[in-house]
Image (cartoon, helix red, strand yellow):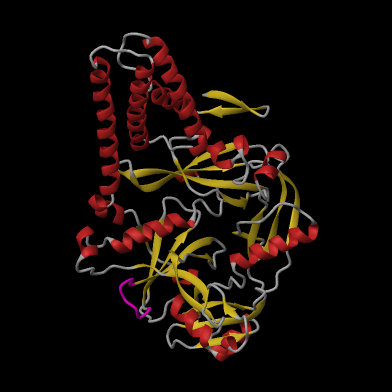
Amino acid sequence: MRTLTTRGKRIEMDKWIFVVWLLFSLCWIDPATGKNWKKRSALGFVLGATLNGLFLYLTQMTLIPVNILLYLATNVACGKIFNSITNEFARFKSDDKHDRKVLPFFFGGVVLFCAMLGLAIISEPANTTALYNLAELEEPDLNLLNTSHIILISSNNAIRLGNNKLGELGNQAKIDEARWQVVNGKLNYLLPLAYAGTTQAWVLGNKGTEGYLMLSAENQSPEVQYVKGHSLRYIPSAIFGHDLKRHIWAKYPTFWQGDSIFQLDGNGNPIYVTVLDLPSVWGITGDKPAGIVVTDPETGQMAKYGVSEIPAWVQRSYEGETVTQYLRWWGLYPHGFWNTLFSKNGITAPVKDLSYRKDDIGEIKIVAGQTSALQPLCGNDGRLYYAAAMGNPNDDSHSLTAYVVANAAKLPIKLMLYPINESIDSLGAAQNIQQLDAVSHVPGHCVQPLNLYNISGKYAWLGPVATSYDEFAVISLTRLDNGKAYFGQNLADVYAKAGLDG
């Protein structure tokens, strides 16, 4: 383990970073000896070392074989171009002997680059069975979905409330993410503070941001709490050695990093949990969790846990995008690659999130978004889960085929599949709600993202309707069995109107 010093702090650096940096830099040495060879090679090495040092530091490239070979090829090709240029400046004339020695290295680098790029392109279609099987299924628990933890405020609204609170306090930081966690038996949003810009990150780098905000996700009008007493220095918005991603990469550069998830440990102290992935297919794709890193954002101390060693107090081990990717492969490749191009039998996909637009007369239109809709679910066991509704992407009827749930802390990732045969997805439900008089006749009112729940054995889309100022107006509920929408001021009210015993 090598060490670096950044702004007075000693940082551990994995030996493989140095090895790869040296390997890339050596590619810039001139392979053709002769006049001024030492000067030309020294100049090439210095330039290559500088460029590769900056590249590795700024990009935090994951040091897996395919990446190393791809950028090794790039360095060989670029290094030989530089060698040819410096040879011309050195006025080294020997009947093109120099170029004859350099060109094979250049073309070898180009061929290797194309080969690695080609492997990356065909890795998914050539391994559809392996990617499909990454999604392991386990027996579903029907009681899990009958939960009383209903989300009544969207993450975007939680971020807005958090930034408003900071503005009232005169705090110059900002909130740009909302992480959910069960605290004292209730589902809450945790809002870590982020630097407002690079200048603030530079000035406050050694001091860090002060604490975090928390508010209830189950209350339509939550009170925002500011929890102080923690100076968080190793965070995603920091720069240089305090940049959380770079800090983790310096010690674990041979793993893909997932998003770092802010949460509280078993003692209520803030931590970041980052999943470490390894590609399982050709060393290129099919990322599988290999463990997690828990980082103390105050001190930077890290602890790595294997798949079977996840502490019980960790509520989220991996980010939702991992589940979405598994579901995409599982839904897309039940019958292989060619089926996706021709017959398309049995193909399903997670339903898309909601996107909001205004037409020419100012009315809000709801359309399908670009990303898959993945909702947080707090089961009746008090644990956190990722949940997604699956549908037929080639069917315009908004029909659903299944509801998929995955434990947010458990590794390896296993999916619980709940079959559904209903004809309304979140987009259809939201569009229906938006055109009803209770919403459309009130200027600025708009239905917020909907979550799917099983309430007394009946599936229903449920979510708040907000005003033009993003303030809570009413709760909407759409039953899947009859497609009807109901409104209420609270859960008991809307359950009663919908004929459900919540």
State whether residue 454 is above or below residue 121: below
Position of 372 compared to 176: left or right?
Answer: left
Residue 301 visible in the shown view: no
Q: How many marks?
A: 0
**109 and 35: which one is in front?**
35
Q: Which residues are magenta?
A: 392-398
**315 and 488: which one is in front?**
488
**Where, by quadrant of the figure, is residue 298 drawn?**
top right
Main SS, magenta residues: loop
Specify whether residue 178 is painted magenta.
no
**Where, by quadrant of the figure, is residue 416 drawn?**
bottom left
Residue at point 55% right, 87% down? 486
State whether residue 85 is above or below residue 339: above
Position of 292 compared to 328: left or right?
Answer: right
**151 and 140: which one is in front?**
151
Please state the horizontal and vertical placement of residue 260, each as a whole percent of the image: 55, 48
Q: Residue furthest top?
A: 35
Residue 189 visible in the shown view: yes
**298 and 64: which one is in front?**
64
Please state the horizontal and vertical placement of residue 47, each as a whole percent of the image: 46, 23
Please state the horizontal and vertical placement of residue 296, each as a whole percent of the image: 63, 41
Residue at point 42% right, 54% down? 413
Residue at point 66% right, 48% down? 197
Q: Quadrant of the C terminus?
A: bottom right
**Where, by quadrant of the figure, is residue 420 drawn?**
bottom left
Specify whether residue 394 is painted magenta.
yes
